[in-house]
């Protein structure tokens, strides 16, 4: 009986509790949404399975979790905790991004910048609700809908909040198709939703090569705190556009970014153990993250409407919602939503301009905050 009793305490059954079950259910819901609803499965499935893994009874008690020094999950989690994975993901994003529409219509950069208002509004709101200034800045960046940037900033100034912040950021990135359409519909009129925009001009290869160089120099001079993210983003784009490093570009936008996405997803999910996540602070972070994302979406749409007051050639204000940096999901949402009102209206190419501008904008915002607060 003594041996049986000892064996029982080496199994998960000895540590099974309601909090574990709740988090496992949350993780399975994420997996279900990714598989059956196709909500960013590349994000939700690794995160959801990581939540199940990290909350299995016995993981924490038997020192197998991300916080157990020497465990395998702890070693893999160091890429998140030390901010290693985010720049590598930005390298892959740069290698798969076409800046042509942004170069052809540079005024749309403003929409990417306008969407960053959600970051700073939530930053102030979180500080007002009792989070210290470092924590508030990390929570605010969720509004950019940019998981790697959220992880990078929080790893530098609020490492104890990486788990809930990263989970919130990636969750809202995946749930863009649910969250953005109601905001867009509320802020636009039926007439505005069917505005057709002229096809952008053709951009030369020389312009495509020069843009990442100028973009890197300009943004890093403004926000040197974001140099690691911005440098890797524009470096990846140079690999793509140069035409002589296709092997490197292909590796960056396929194998490298896929590996980092898997590792971030699983380890971030595993970091949200019941003891860490099921508390008032983490729930408040989730709520503030949702508010930040909604404000960012609304800011982009409203600013596009303001721009139309001064433009002869009107822009469809729905593309302002793509100013959040969930690439390319936000641009696809704008395209699909616009098609509901006019099947012949193709907004994807136009929405990609503020979308990639949003990626740059969120990295610059993180760099500014990091430079001021570090």
Image: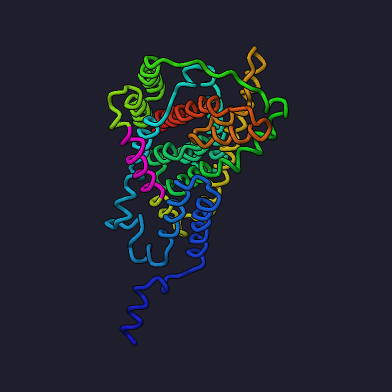
- Image check: 309 left or right of 268? right
Residue occupying the point 27% across, 57% down? 70
Up the image or down, 133 lies above or below 207; here it is: below
Q: In which quarter of the image is the C terminus?
A: top left
Q: Which of 134 and 336 is in front in this view?
A: 336
Q: Main secondary structure of the magenta part?
A: helix
Let me know if residue 263 is in the magenta part.
yes
Give the magenta-colored segment's residue range. 250-265
The structure's colour scheme is rainbow
Q: In which quarter of the image is the N terminus?
A: bottom left
In the image, 187 versus 162, the foreground residue is 187
- Say left or right for 367 vs 301: left
- Residue 140 appears in the rendering: no
In the rendered image, the residue lying farthest to the right is 190
In the rendering, at what x and y percent does residue 212 appear? 38, 21
Give x and y (percent) for residue 305: 65, 22
Residue 56 is one of the magenta-drawn residues: no
Residue 344 makes an appearance in the image:
yes
> How many numbered marks have been drawn onto this rendered protein structure?
0
Q: Observer-nearest residue: 194 or 50?
A: 194
Residue at the (39%, 44%) spot, across then down: 261
Horizontal side of residue 348 vs 74, given as left or right: right
On the image, the x and y values in percent for residue 42 come to: 44, 46
Of all residues, the one furthest to the front in this rendering is 344
Q: Which residue is outermost to the bottom?
A: 1
Left or right placement of residue 89 versus residue 192 in this view: left
Residue 259: x and y, percent? 34, 45
Q: Quadrant of residue 185?
A: top right
Q: Is residue 351 above or below residue 133?
A: above
Q: In this view, does 264 lie above or below 72?
A: above
């Amino acid at each position: 009986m003594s041996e049986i009793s000892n064996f029982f305490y080496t199994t998960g059954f000895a540590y099974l509790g309601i909090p574990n079950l709740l988090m496992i259910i949350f993780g399975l819901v994420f997996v279900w949404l990714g598989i059956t609803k196709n909500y960013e499965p590349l994000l939700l499935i690794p995160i959801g399975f990581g939540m199940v893994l990290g909350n299995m009874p016995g993981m924490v008690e038997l020192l197998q979790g991300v916080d157990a020094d020497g465990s395998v999950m702890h070693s893999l989690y160091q890429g998140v905790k030390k901010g290693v994975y985010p720049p590598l993901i930005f390298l892959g994003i740069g290698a798969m991004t076409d800046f042509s529409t942004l170069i052809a219509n540079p005024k749309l950069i403003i929409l990417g910048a306008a969407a960053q208002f959600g970051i700073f509004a939530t930053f102030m709101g979180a500080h007002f609700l009792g989070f210290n200034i470092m924590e508030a800045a990390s929570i605010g960046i969720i509004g950019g809908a940019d998981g790697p940037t959220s992880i990078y900033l929080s790893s530098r100034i609020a490492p104890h909040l990486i788990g809930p912040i990263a989970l919130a950021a990636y969750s809202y990135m995946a749930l863009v198709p649910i969250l953005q359409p109601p905001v867009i519909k509320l802020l636009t009129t039926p007439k505005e939703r069917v505005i057709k925009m002229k096809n952008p001009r053709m951009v030369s290869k020389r312009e495509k090569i020069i843009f990442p160089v100028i973009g890197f120099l300009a943004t890093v001079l403004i926000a040197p705190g974001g140099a690691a993210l911005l440098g890797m983003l524009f470096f990846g784009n140079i690999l793509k556009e140069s035409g002589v490093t296709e092997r490197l570009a292909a590796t960056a936008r396929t194998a490298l970014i896929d590996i980092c996405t898997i590792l971030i997803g699983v380890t971030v999910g595993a970091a949200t153990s019941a003891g860490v996540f099921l508390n008032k602070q983490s729930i408040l972070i989730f709520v503030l993250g949702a508010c930040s994302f909604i404000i960012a979406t609304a800011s982009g749409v409203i600013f596009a409407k303001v721009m139309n007051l001064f433009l002869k050639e009107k822009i469809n204000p729905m593309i302002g919602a793509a100013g959040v940096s969930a690439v390319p999901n936000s641009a696809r949402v704008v395209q699909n939503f616009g098609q509901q009102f006019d099947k012949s209206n193709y907004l994807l190419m136009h929405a990609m301009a503020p979308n990639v501008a949003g990626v740059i904008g969120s990295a610059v915002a993180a760099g500014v905050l990091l430079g001021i607060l570090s």
